[in-house]
Image (tube, rainbow, N blue to C red):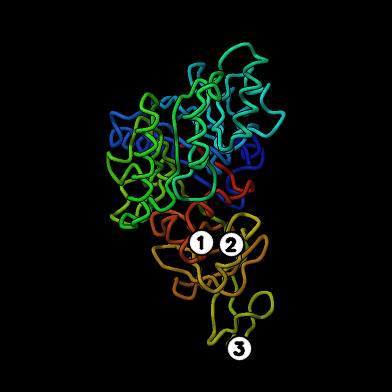
């Protein structure tokens, strides 16, 4: 929900407030850039900057010094380009679908090539364009998701004509387990990437995601591309999260009431009150990115107290137990915290049985977004 709507209605009348601290975001980027130096530090801003608004996040990152931006799709690149300085580079992680090559070539958008078919299409586009075109070559080093395989690497080395129309900016791969600092897959993928680097000795490397930045300099290559850590999320299980929190979410109370013991609460009567309870119904639900899996598991916070979610999360609302608060502490329009000082992004994700990425990217458009 944009600021003009908030001004028309009045912030106090809006059902939820999603605060996004752009200064904390910039501080996180600078910290990561310092940790990765002398490697260049890019930033992943796919999925509308992890749901926080690429039109606001990307210029803030550019002001902090970022010039390399990663999205997933060509349409994201098109929408992002007008918000960035002229010297910024945009990389499309999924590469290009057939037919997208002319637009990317015309506008200087750089595909990440994941298959020989994509490479052939981009090479043909370069022929039509009358110039070599930039690209990143992604190799699969063990995640089995995207990337050229060992046989493709051999073909490229055997026939250099396959790359005659391509200005290879980086060779790249993606770490599957970088958030697990002791996972042996990290070392295996590093060894595979180092073997590739030896076969492409004059090409720069782009390897580390957020967790990879924290794994150490062996993983950094020439450019790193953090995502979740920029937005304040924990990128590694190995230590306390060094990132500043970027997001706070507060939701308003619609109604409070007291129910006697034995009362059924929520869809399906899934929760039965064991004793008399004071309840508050909140103005957000799974349509707002608060998963149904938080039912009878998650919590909100007010006055430093954990207020359990009772019964099933609905599309537009949920019910919390406020019995631990003083009588009258909450009423119509009161704000309670879902993400903030009392409950980190990772904590609500754990309660929902998911990861911070899914919570962050799912936060809906019905909150008033307040950029700090």
Marks 2,1: beta carbons within 8 A: yes
Residue matched to label 2: 291
Question: Which of disc 1 and disc 3 is earlier in sequence?
Answer: 3
Residue matched to label 1: 354
Q: Residue at x 39, y 37 (%)?
A: 196
The answer to whether residue 87 is visible is yes
What is the x, y in percent for residue 107?
A: 61, 19
- Could you tell me which secondary element the residue under label 1 belongs to? loop
Residue matched to label 3: 262
Q: Is residue 300 left or right of residue 316?
A: left
Disc count in the image? 3
Q: Residue at x 28, y 28 (%)?
A: 38
Marks 2 and 3, how far apart in space?
Answer: 26 Å
What is the x, y in percent for residue 1?
A: 63, 42
- Could you tell me which secondary element the residue under label 2 belongs to? loop
Residue 265: name its quadrant: bottom right
């Amino acid at each position: 929900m944009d600021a003009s709507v908030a001004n028309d209605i009045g912030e106090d009348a809006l059902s939820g407030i999603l605060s996004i601290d752009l200064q904390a975001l910039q501080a996180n980027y600078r910290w990561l850039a310092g940790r990765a130096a002398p490697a260049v530090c890019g930033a992943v801003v796919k999925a509308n900057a992890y749901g926080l608004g690429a039109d606001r996040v990307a210029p803030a990152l550019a002001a902090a010094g970022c010039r390399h931006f990663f999205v997933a799709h060509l349409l994201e690149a098109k929408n992002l380009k007008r918000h960035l300085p002229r010297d910024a580079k945009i990389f499309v992680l999924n590469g290009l679908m057939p037919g997208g090559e002319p637009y990317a070539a015309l506008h200087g958008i750089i595909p990440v090539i994941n298959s020989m078919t994509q490479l052939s299409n981009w090479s043909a586009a370069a022929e039509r364009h009358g110039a070599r075109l930039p690209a990143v070559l992604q190799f699969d080093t063990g995640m089995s998701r995207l990337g050229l395989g060992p046989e493709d690497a051999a073909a490229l080395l055997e026939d250099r004509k396959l790359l005659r129309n391509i200005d290879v900016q980086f060779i790249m791969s993606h770490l599957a387990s970088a958030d697990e600092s002791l996972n042996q897959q990290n070392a295996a993928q590093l060894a595979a990437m180092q073997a590739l680097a030896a076969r492409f000795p004059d090409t720069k490397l782009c390897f580390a995601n957020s967790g990879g930045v924290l794994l150490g300099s062996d993983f950094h290559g020439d450019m790193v591309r953090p995502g979740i850590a920029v937005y304040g999320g924990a990128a590694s299980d190995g230590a306390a999260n060094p990132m500043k929190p970027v997001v706070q979410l507060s939701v308003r109370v619609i109604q409070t009431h007291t129910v006697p013991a034995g009362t059924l609460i929520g869809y399906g009567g899934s929760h039965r009150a064991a004793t008399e309870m004071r309840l508050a119904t909140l103005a957000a639900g799974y349509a707002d990115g608060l998963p149904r899996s938080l039912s009878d598991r998650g919590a909100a916070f007010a006055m430093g107290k954990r207020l359990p979610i009772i019964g099933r999360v609905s599309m537009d609302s949920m019910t919390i137990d406020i019995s631990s608060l003083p009588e009258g502490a909450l009423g119509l329009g009161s704000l309670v915290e879902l993400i903030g000082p009392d409950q980190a992004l990772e904590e609500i994700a754990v309660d929902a049985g998911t990861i911070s990425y899914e919570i962050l990217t799912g936060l809906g458009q019905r909150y008033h977004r307040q950029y700090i």
